[in-house]
Amino acid sequence: MPPVRLVFRNLLKHRTRTVLTAASLAVAIFLLCVLRSLLVVLESGIKASASNRLIVQSSVSLFVLLPESYQAKMNRIEGVERTVRWNWFGGYYQEPKNFFAQFATDVEDLFEVYPEIVLVEGSQEDFFNDRRACVIGWEIARKYGMRVGDTMPIIGGLYPRTDGAPWDFRIAGIYRSVKPNVDNNTLFFHADLLEKAIESGAASGPEGVGVYVLRLSPDADRVRVAETVDTLFAGGPQRTQTASEAEFQAQFVTMIGNIPFFVGSIGGGVLIAILLATLNTMLMAAREQTRDVGVLKALGFQDGTMFSLMLAQSLILTTVGGMSGLLLAFATQEPLAGVLGTVFPGYHITARTALEALLVTLLIGVLAGIVPALRARQLSVLNALRSVG
Amino acid sequence: MSAEALIQLKDLTKTYTRGGETLRVLDNLALSMERGGFYALMGPSGSGKTTLLNLIGGIDRADHGEIRIGGIDLAHLSNAELARWRAASVGFVFQGFNLMPVLTALENVELPLLLTDLSRSQRREHAQYALELVGLSDRMHHKPGQLSGGQEQRVAIARAIVTDPTLILADEPTGDLDRKSAQAVLELLTRLNVELGKTILMVTHDPAAAEVARTVVHLDKGRLGRIETRPREAAGA
Amino acid sequence: MALVPFAYNLRSLIVRWPSTVLTVLGIAATVAVIVGVLALQQGFTSLFREQGREDIAVFLRQGATNEGDSAFTRERAMILMKTVPQIAEDAQGRRLVSAECYLAVRRNKTQGAGETNVSVRGVMPMSFEIYGSDIRFVEGRNFVPGTDEVIIGSKLANRIEGARMGEILQFNTTPFRVVGIFDHDGPFSSEIWGDHDRISEALERPVYNRVVATLKPDTNWAELAQRMDQDPQVPSKLLTEREYLTSQTRVFSFVLSALGVVLAVIMGIAAVFTATNTMLTAIAARTAEIGILLSMGFRPHAVFLGFMLEALLIGVIGGIVGALAVMPLNGIQTGAMNFQTFTEVAFAFRVTPPIVAGSIGFAAALGVLGGAIPAWRAARLRPTEAMRRG
């Protein structure tokens, strides 16, 4: 039976050193968990995309609107069950930093086309019947202390009112999204309201529709429908680009750049720094324990056992540090999700991220411990006993 | 005469090469040692006495020759087998004690037992018994840093006998001790030899240590010098 | 006060070289990552800031934060262009003022890397007079006003599909031909330019996004800005081009700074721990030597300083190694999304002397932080105790 107790005692003997190394590991693993989780958020939004929805946008620019006349034309395409307008409103609540998404939409079709959006408070009827009504995601409700029946004034960014006043929306409902592809940080209101306001001159802003969302019938050929739409409008006035919801979500991610690469590089840099720190500690420990290894071998312990002990020492140290970092990541999940909510909705540490953290921890433990372990195995008894340590 | 000798050395040679020069530390040595004997290996520096001890203890390998202990030729054992043999057959006592500073006295003595099949409670028992033998039961939970030099060496001796090995090999066991502690250690070794019949090989400079041994083997430049034997009754006091 | 001979400290570092090397590498890695991030930030911001001219005025709609948000109707733009008295005139007596329309247009990146957004700018001929020699043609010629021709910035050449002389770029339903490639030291080198009328018609954008002008040299900018803010007909926001471009770097710059700080802290912590560990062990091993030094008559603060110098040296060497490792990045072209305008901008990494100096200083600080506690402990040893323990 290997003297495992020795490993623990040795780690405890040099408490400062053990704590310092474990602490820097904890910090590094914590950072890696956070970075990984940011990537996970981006991926999960894409993965959870519905396969029966297509997004029709301008092929020219994200900032160009499509004509209203397109809606009726698309409704007539075979395979299309419903179409919904989504107009990015671009406003904010009280201050520019209180920014979240607002969309003017065809409210009666919204819940049909997006069954993920479920009202947990208020009623759809109420929402449909009052043109000035809106529904908000529960995270907005919580952040600003809003309840059904309250009025939420939104200052129009893209669509300022001519009288300079904010847009007053009465909250008719609070929703919760049951899948990660729709976040809980959005406000939906009547597209009719916006249309009428611009027509009457009460507000100014670009006319048209930001994107159309098409819900397809179950047996529709997604690719064929998309092609039909784009061909239909190839002659203008605005050419379209129709994509699956997954592609639509993904385009924003790829536009920002090669995020996985960037995050990976940073993660790599941090890991190298940590690996060096841990390796340094293990080599120091090995040097100090040279004589002990000699004694153990003299007593009759096998070379392989010495190898295992050294490696175990490294693994125990890294596991304690790494798991502390993981715990810290879990502990800060809520507060970080609150801070990052608007840009990275649904931030949380998945089981897979935790597993990856564990694997990285073990890998560092092995890499940092392998050299001292090999050395301990090779050490001749006499040389070890003679060592001054 | 006694039964077949426990240790039989034949043509034993060990050389070191340093800077182009080859030194013969042991030169075709031949020697027999009896079971139950108490041998002191003496000689000037460089005489090869420590090397001889190391070779018998299986922590060094000869370049040439035979080392038969209990009938087994050590040269034929692999490193792994040698380790197992040491665990079963040898107990070491070093000049610098070489206890694990992070373990208590009891845990130190228990170490060699980890190489056996004994259960945890059995190990505890044996270790406690060994500490009792050397008179340090009251110190069993102290760490080496809390013990005097003499006490440390007695713990080391307890460790050396806990597995009931065939041989006890001691390399200058009194070298780092004051007169009084040295005496206590030598008395202990004598008791182990006389009362428990342990075979002891001790490398030493110390004439007082040589006094307690019954056979003194002199080495010079890797070769056997004179061998003095004292009758059983005259040894120790 | 006699200082401990530095040769002693230096030799100790060399004798324990594995730990010294690992500590140096840890600090070097930290510095390398930080310099990399800062070089990225510096490359981006200097593209905007340094190339923005302080004598060119940019008029935006009141309340707009960038030209994408801003909009002037044709009439309002004309009023602005014709009536502001501080607008300078060229040799022929023409007012040096131009209106531009702007849109971030989708384009495919080369090598199938997906889509990105490219800035497309419709300009009047006067724009070229205003920007003057900032715009230099490297291939082909300028577009003829009123035609479906475009010129492209040189940095687009390897990044966007179809960004070559003679290629047809389709905007909505209108094809435009590339007739020239131009160079600009600032962000225009990632843009596509064409005739304002033709571009705005093709993109169905009947508004101008901004008005640019050269103002008379004696203009009181602050006064004019205030007047434009309160103008009854065309209330607008006035900035110098430099101010405008600088404002566009705010978000990206902030994000990279924040990233740099986070990385500096985390990797710095690891590096400091490594340094502390190394020095603590070194001092433990050299206790006897320290005892000897103390008994020889060297005062504790001399011992302390000696070890601090060791730590400082490790830090500085680590900083230099890290900076050297990343130096090759300097000048390498890369691109990033400007989050504020959501358009792709190409620029080069810039490793500047202040960045290098600052990073080495940071590394030195890391070394010193790491060495402080060990040095303190060393200085507090009592000679007899030290020599006995060692």
Image (spheres, grey):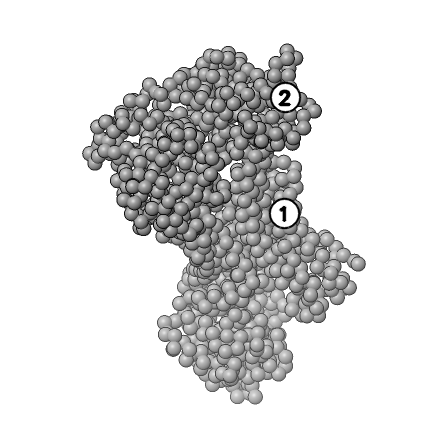
Q: Residue at x 75, y 55 (%)?
A: C5
- Measured as percent of width and height from the top left, residue C121 is found at 50, 22
Q: Which mark is residue A139?
A: none
Q: Which mark is residue C85?
A: 2
Give the farthest residue toward the right: C1
- Residue nearer the viewer, A154 or B110: A154
Q: Quadrant of the C terminus of chain A?
A: bottom right
Query: What amino acid type is highlighted by mark number 1?
Result: Phe
Q: Quadrant of the N terminus of chain A?
A: bottom left
Q: Chain of mark 1?
A: C
Q: Which residue is mark 1?
A: C362
Q: Residue at x 40, y 35 (%)?
A: A88
- Measured as percent of width and height from the top left, residue C108 is found at 41, 26
- Residue nearer the viewer, C161 or B38: C161
Q: Residues within 10 Å of mark 2 (few under 14, many from 20)?
A: few
Q: Chain of mark 2?
A: C
Distance from Cα at disc 1 to Cα at disc 2: 52 Å
Up the image or down, B205 lies above or below C135; here it is below
* Tag 2 secondary structure: loop
* Residue A79 appears in the rendering: yes
Query: What amino acid type is highlighted by mark number 2?
Result: Pro
* Tag 1 secondary structure: helix
